[in-house]
Amino acid sequence: MKAISRRKFLKILGGVSLGLSFSDEGICAVFEENDFLNQKSDFFSPNGWLFICEDESIYIFCSQCEIGQGVLTVLPTIVADELEADWEKVKVLQAPFSEFYEDPVWESQVTAGSASVRHFYMPLRRAGAIARTMLIKAAARHWNCKESECKAKKGHIIHIPTDRSISYGRLVKSARRLPLPKEIELKREKEFRYIGSSLPRIDAKAKINGTAIYGLDVRLPYMCYCLLMRPPRFGARLLGFSSKKVQGLPRIERIFSIGNKVAIVGTDISSVIRARKEIDARWGRGRDDSFDNKKIGLFLKRALNHKGTVKTNRGDWKAGLRSSRVVHKAEYFLPYLAHAQMEPLNCTVLFTGKHCRIWTSCQNKSDIMAVAKRVTGLSEKDIEINITFIGGSFGRRFEVDYVKEALEVSVKARLRKPIKLFWTREDDFKNDFYRPANCARIIGGCDSNGLIRSWIHKVVAPSVYERIEPSLLKGGIDPSAVESIHNSSYNFRNLFLEYVWMKDMPPPLGFWRSVGNSHNSFMVESFIDELSFKAGIDPLEFRLKNLKKSPRARGVLELVAKKLGWWEKPQKGQALGISQHYLVYTYIALGAEVSVDESSGKIKVHKIVSAVDCGRAVNKAVVKEQIEGGILFGLSAALKEEVRFSKGGTSTKNFFDYPILTMSETPPVEVYLIESGERPTGVGEVGTAPVAPAIANAVFGAVGARIRELPLTPERVLAHLQNKGNGNI
Amino acid sequence: MLELLVNGKRLKTRSSPDTPLLWFLREELGLTGTKYSCGVGFCGSCSVLINGESKRSCLLTIRDCIGSSIVTIEGIPQDHPVKRAWFEERVPECGYCQPGQIISAVALLNKNPFPSAEDINIAMDNNLCRCGTYNRIKRAILRASRAIKS
């Protein structure tokens, strides 16, 4: 096999003619990809991940979507390091849709599940090492010396005995004629130049200057705008609509129905917004027109007495409970949550009948392609996907519902002009795929030393996978509903875990940062605290005793305890709470310092400290930023968030009735990384899961109120403080 | 014809005086650094400077801005101490709220070049960020303040 030819390279790029370039000057330029390549006199590209030009510039493709997690910097860093490139010369390109760029584990072009670095780390190292090996071979031929006398150093090959050097650009012509190497040698870890450092993010300047283009910022000649009217209740059908009041309004091009929605297309954004308010639509009954928050609590708590499907039946949990010196039982309840990402959903489509071009801020290229083929009837080669910067997702942009809407509108409108379909904030809250409400009952027991003898756990929740991937509902068990319990670091010896599937709950569900970990961590880590209290054992000590078989979990806990000053007396009125969790192959422990104003019930979080063992950190600063962001996302949910429903639909409208964390409520956050030298594991979702239990545990320490429901609003805290006075904890 | 002053340039428009400033900036002038997020003046993503103060452009019409100086994120020089501090403190993640955050920070420092942590909380509390960059925003404002001082 030879190094990739120019023609083959263009073939990998497929029909793509547009791309976004992110250069280190912070310029975000849209250019004609093919023309751009033609302008380059010659280049060397051993694979679809990189090409090196004669002018010394190095282009690296990023297969994953930039959602804010820093992937556009981090993945190219891996290639650049193995290539021994000079990072200053590297430019990053967002990879187009192509099988070549599939996630090697998931075999799909999707950015999700905290997987980018853990799935691409080795493939990208190999890609860089292949190019480096070939450049060395080319240099050895140039000097007529042995390859072992040459080494790569920051964009040059050095001839060690004579200290001569030749730049990568000057080796382009000869390297491209070489066959691909049969064997490559990866760098040793101590030779890493960029991996393990904290390179600045390449998207930082564009985002600071306001030049970064997000989906909503796409502007095309003759572009129209589209808003949809959607059913006010879950499952309601569109019976009819009247656009009389809108007729004759300037700048409105089309009004028509698509399924159970009404589309308003116009040439001006404010006219479209105004027109939507003037349309009278009639809707049929929904799935449950009396569905509201009261019903959620009622249904779920009642179902705690139903028999579930058994996920794990391990050891003799009955005998374990009988022989326990301390036995405890508790029930927990959590609400539906919204993603509330800052950029509302949107998608721009230009459909000509023969060709379809899509611009969107979405993280799921494979699903975009599938839905585009289905809706337009076109084949893959006639569909072009352009992923822009993404203004937050937290799981919401794993979905492609808005892409489907934009495609359907474009096909039906037959305008032959680009149409930008956008959602208002109200559309976003009302039509989210929510984190499910859920509740759990745990019965557990331990011996007098604090060793857990029995853990009996029932989860009641609607199923996320029922819609997203029903094939994974093995035996009627939703994998996300029970995740992190049966495979917890505590390694419960005697475990009975069952799941009660709440069917017929109307709100549609989706992945929300950390998915099932976001609730199960709260339940398990709250219960552990309760059990330790009942056993009269310090909650940190209790955890460490039960984590004997998990040194990495102990490692993060011990580090947090040290940094938090666990054994020191906290300031008056303040208390510490602690938790640990294992998700996406990463270990995290978290501690919070909290006080409670007993007159208002308001919680003040003074400090959060966390320790993380995620194996090798490719970019330390990015990892810490992701952990801190995840923690504050979890803190926001723990203290404030709950979606409200009434009359069968969502009544939450906007940020004023779905308040999220603000600056004045944000505590200092310390993140410590444990350098274990293991392969990189997940980071993006890690911080979110362990926050709520640490806060709830600290609140118990501060005021003696054990709160088993979220969010921890002042009203809820106050109610618990009053109940406590009645001896009812 | 309305006359407006945007980023130091005088310009004329035939747009209706009722056009929200946010859409005028984004769609007519192509200044897409000013972001739409909540549309009700609650989140701060659409903040612009009106005569030096941070205002929500989704709540203003262009009529409201006649005779005022409008400055968007694109009008803040790239070497402005606030923008430089934002880079040095590595503030942005998804970045969507950051133009609004920077505008509010510039307005704060214009009025109060040496703010306390509490001053920053008060001035910035109505600029929402979902990625959790608040601590770095705070540090960046303090860094910019030090840069102004020296």
Image (spheres, helix red, strand yellow):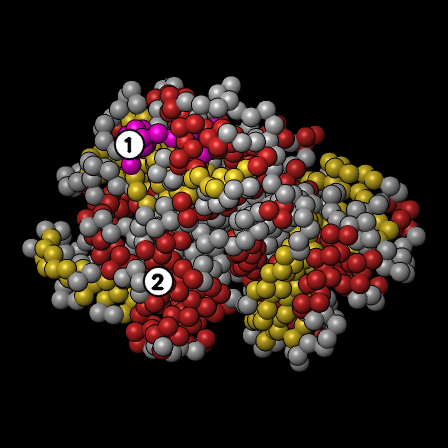
- What residue appears at the point 31 percent right and 30 percent down from the top-left corner? A41
Q: Nearer the viewer, residue A711 or B118?
A: B118
Label drawn at residue B83:
2
Name above or below for residue B76 compared with residue A362. Answer: below
Which element type, helix, strand or loop, lies under badge 1? helix
In the picture provided, is B83 more to the left or to the right than A680? left
Res. B57 visible in picture: no
Q: Which residues are magenta?
A: A31-52
- What residue appears at the point 10 percent right and 55 percent down from the top-left corner? B12
Q: Amino acid at mark 2?
A: Lys
Label 1 crowd bin: few (<14), some (14–19), many (20+), radius 10 Å: few
Q: Nearer the viewer, residue A497 or B51?
A: B51
Name above or below for residue A237 compared with residue B35. Answer: above
Tags 1 and 2 both on a single chain: no
Determine which quarter of the picture holds residue A348: top left
Residue marked by disc 1: A39
Q: Amino acid at mark 1?
A: Gln
Res. B3 visible in picture: yes
Give percent across and percent down for residue B81. Answer: 34, 67
Q: Nearer the viewer, residue A679 or A523?
A: A679
Name above or below for residue A74 compared with residue A696. Answer: above
Give percent across and percent down for residue A18. Answer: 32, 33
Which element type, helix, strand or loop, lies under badge 2? helix
